[in-house]
Image (cartoon, rainbow, N blue to C red):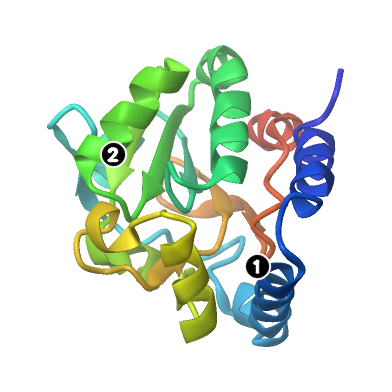
Amino acid sequence: MTTLNAELRTFYEARQQQIPADIRQIMQRAGQELADSGQADRALAVGAKAPRFSLPSATGQTLALDDLLTDGPVVLTFYRGAWCPYCNIALRSLQQHHEAISARGARLVAVSPQIPDESLTLAEKHELAFDILSDIGSETAKQYGLAFDLPDDLATVYDKLGFDLQRVNDGHPRTLPLPATYVIDRDGTIRWAFVNTDYTTRAEPADILDALA
């Protein structure tokens, strides 16, 4: 069975051939600068208390971490948005493992800075059975140490590619979260963490299941 990151790598290699060299250079430089910034090392890690949040879901509910934890551990994953093909691949993979995550007594929740309408479209498109929450302005991502601002040239590239982050992120087009996944136990402590500045790399569902076990 192909791992998620093997699938992401195959997609990345095919995608690189379709992107003009000048745009590829901007993307690679921005990625290197983010990696060099050390932000991944400053994000919350194992042993930290998970910051509490209360966020709107794609279906119009408001979900609070405290309420989710009453039923068991929470698998909390941060993604960039429905416009990001790597996020789509990762969320589809999580959906394929959703039953196994639930069978271990955990609740899977995905968070992005996009508006609920965008999240609903995404959830319907991929038939996602887990909660998709909107963190407008990335306030929750900031508490976890994950929020960063796109450099000017990369923001311009994203505009040219038609991602329309001004609209989908409700007036916060530059701020995105690092891809991250946390396993949080019932008392609110982070027991497992994956944080990476490289948006083409994500937490392996098999590793999440191991952490829950």
Q: Check the image and report above or below for 153 versus 27.
A: below
Among the two numbered marks 2 and 1 on one chain, the one whose residue lies closer to the N terminus: 2
x then y, percent, for residue 205: 68, 31
The mark total stands at 2
Q: Based on the displayed image, in which of its 4 quarters is residue 179 positioned?
A: bottom right
Residue under pointer 1: 197
Circle 1: residue type: Thr
The residue labelled by disc 2 is: 118
Q: Residue at x 41, y 54 (%)?
A: 163
Q: Residue at x 23, y 47 (%)?
A: 115
Horizontal side of residue 188 vs 135, given as left or right: right
For label 2, the SS is helix
Q: Is residue 123 above or below residue 109?
A: above
In the image, taking residue 31 as reference, residue 49 lies left or right, namely left
- Image quadrant in which the N terminus is located: top right
Residue 85 horizontal/vertical position (percent): 58, 42
**SS under mark 1:** loop
- The residue under label 2 is which amino acid type? Glu
Categorize mark 2 by other alpha carbons within 10 Å: few (<14), some (14-19), many (20+): some
On the picture, is 55 further left or further right than 1? Answer: left
Report whether 43 appears left or right of 53. Answer: right
Residue 70 in view here: no
The CA span between labels 2 and 1 is 23 Å
